Image (cartoon, helix red, strand yellow):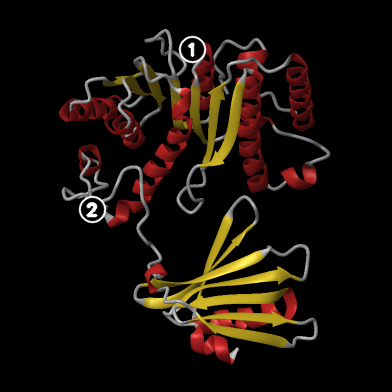
Amino acid sequence: MNLLRQTMNENMLRMTISGKRHGELADKVKIRPVKLKEQLYFQTSVSDGKKEFHKNYEKAELLEQLDHWLRKDYRQLQMDTTTQSIQALVSKKGKATVKQKIARDMRSARVLDHNRKKRYLLEEGTPIPFLVDLGVMTAEGAIVRSRYDKFRQINRYLEFVEDILPELDKDRELTLIDFGCGKSYLTFALYYYLTVKKQYRIRMIGLDLKKDVMEHCQELAEKYGYDRLTFLTGDIADYDGVDQVDMVVSLHACDTATDYALEKALQWNAKVIFAVPCCHHELNRQMHSTEMNPVLKYGLIQERMAALMTDAFRADVLELEGYQVQVLEFIDMEHTPKNILIRAVKQNTPLPFEKKEKLLDSLQTCMGIWNVNPLFYRLRLGGEDEKDTD
């Protein structure tokens, strides 16, 4: 510990703890120095295979944690600084064997800034008119500190879009609809990214119930010269202004509005669907199960389970309809609890009959266990063609 105490400073590049002694532990713990408000901390990074978890320690706290890890949980420590490399192996009896060697000068690799600059699809430092007007950027292209989360969200969204661009035909004009677009941060971002950055020819429609908001967004679109971007006031379930749509977007549409948006997308045989559902009330009202009562008697638990099941059922129905479906984390949980993105891409060949029958049977069985009948399922498979009046 004395050696670590001496070398854990701004010259440290990285540290890795590995060689777990118990099966339930993470394979390794990665550690790096970070600066927060000019104070030095050490950030640990642990992955469970799907998500990475971070925690910041002061030096004394981390030394105490390292002592515990190396005595109880892990066998090996590897540490690199700008001047040396240190390796420690700890036996079952707690005896440490330490090796040190002079390292090449690696100062150029040092990154201490916790918020180190990331390369975004929409770059910092380049003024983008709609981001300036929406208060995310200054006129010089700097990100407004209080709006940085929104800037990250916009770029994260565009990263998801970038993944599916090969599915869209670049040789013709594409039609995109954004249901429930609200203030349209992401609508403007998507239009700008596809037309200005990627040179796609698109016609894009933003639809929302708030007339004054849509009028303001239309004024902004005209101001920026976005002549193929139109904002309309209307309801998702009733909209029939187009005959064919290539991409349907529905972000934070409340409760069953997401179901109507997905149903519209299927009617149009949309190639790509993006949905970030919000306000899951329908299944929460329906859900009941004697066997599951020890879980469902807690209102908060039932509410969260209902939300997750709603989105899982939506994804299953999309798969039955011939889409390749992914359920992804949209943005960090710390920014909004509604952070699930359903991304669906229409496949060129339908789901094989046997696989479709098996998926449908398991879906119906699961619905029966929880005594629920989701609207999206009813709209596509249950003969329901009227609006849910719950």
Q: Residue 245 carries which label?
A: none
Q: What secondary structure is marked by label 2?
A: loop
Marked residue nearer the N-terminal end (1 or 2): 2
Amino acid type indicated by mark 1: Trp
Q: Is residue 354 left or right of residue 150?
A: right
Q: Residue 246 occupies which quadrant of the picture?
A: top left
Instruction: Report x, y in % for residue 181.
Output: 37, 29
Instruction: Report x, y in % for residue 1.
Output: 60, 88
Q: Residue 110 occupies which quadrant of the picture?
A: bottom left
* Residue at the bottom extreme, as displayed: 2
Q: Quadrant of the C terminus?
A: top right
Q: Residue 289 occupies which quadrant of the picture?
A: top right
Q: Residue 268 carries which label?
A: 1
Instruction: Report x, y in % for residue 169.
Output: 42, 19
Q: In this view, does 92 lie to the left or right of 208?
A: right
Q: What secondary structure is marked by label 1?
A: loop
Amino acid type indicated by mark 2: Ala
Q: Can residue 214 be seen in this view?
A: yes
Q: Please give the name of the residue rendered at 55% of the width and 27% of the height, measured from the top-left corner.
A: 344
Q: Residues within 10 Å of mark 2 (few under 14, many from 20)?
A: some
* Residue at the top extreme, as displayed: 243
Q: Which mark is residue 142?
A: 2
Front residue of 336 and 8: 8
CA distance for labels 1 and 2: 40 Å
Q: Please give the name of the residue rendered at 62% of the width and 43% of the height, measured from the top-left corner.
A: 304
Q: Is residue 375 visible?
A: no
The correct choice, above or below, for 48 with respect to 342 in the image is below
Q: Please give the name of the residue rendered at 50% of the width and 19% of the height, measured from the top-left corner.
A: 271
